[in-house]
């Protein structure tokens, strides 16, 4: 195995762990989303927490997209 192959494999594992992290963040938002949908007391705070989590998820997703694109181009070369 060449050094580049190890690098590609490490990136793939990192992408996989990032996707798992993103899924966990979405799951953590579920309780706040239910509170917000039901309009229970504290719903405005739930909305703020949801927006904050969604921004983190968006940033993580963008990083994953960039990593995948870079890896794809590295494999082609």
Image: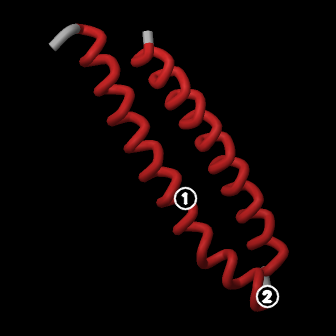
Q: Residues within 10 Å of mark 2 (few under 14, many from 20)?
A: few
Left or right: where does residue 8 sit relative to residue 55?
left
Q: Residues within 10 Å of mark 1 (few under 14, many from 20)?
A: some
Residue 43 has which mark? none
Between 49 and 1, the residue placed more toward the observer is: 1
Q: Residue at x 55, y 27 (%)?
A: 69
Between 65 and 20, the residue placed more toward the observer is: 65
Q: Residue at x 50, y 31 (%)?
A: 68
| Callout 1 secondary element | helix
Please say if 17 is above or below 75: below
- Quadrant that contains the N terminus: top left
Give percent across and percent down for residue 44.
Answer: 84, 74
Residue 41 has which mark? 2
- Quadrant that contains the C terminus: top left
Labels 2 and 1: the sequence-earlier one: 1
Please say if 2 is above or below 44: above
Please say if 38 is above or below 11: below
Residue 4, quarter of picture: top left
Q: Residue at x 72, y 64 (%)?
A: 50
Task: For marks 2 and 1, give the one nearer the viewer.
Answer: 1
Give percent across and percent down for residue 60.
Answer: 59, 41
Q: Residue at x 52, y 68 (%)?
A: 27
The colour scheme is: secondary structure
Please say if 53 is above or below 30: above
Q: Across the whole image, how many numbered discs are drawn on residues?
A: 2
Q: Which residue is mark 1?
A: 25
- In the image, farthest residue toward the front: 76
Between 31 and 22, the residue placed more toward the observer is: 22
| Callout 2 secondary element | loop
Left or right: where does residue 57 sit relative to residue 43?
left
Give percent across and percent down for residue 11.
Answer: 38, 27
Measured in 3D between alpha carbons, the distance from the residue under mark 2 to the one under mark 1, in whole angstroms, is: 23 Å
């Amino acid at each position: 195995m060449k050094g580049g192959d190890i690098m590609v494999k490490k990136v793939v594992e990192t992408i996989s762990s990032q996707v798992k992290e993103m899924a966990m963040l979405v799951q953590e938002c579920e309780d706040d989303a239910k509170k917000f949908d039901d309009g229970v007391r504290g719903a405005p705070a739930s909305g703020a927490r949801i927006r904050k989590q969604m921004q983190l998820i968006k940033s993580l997703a963008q990083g994953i997209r960039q990593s995948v694109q870079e890896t794809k181009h590295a494999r082609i070369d």
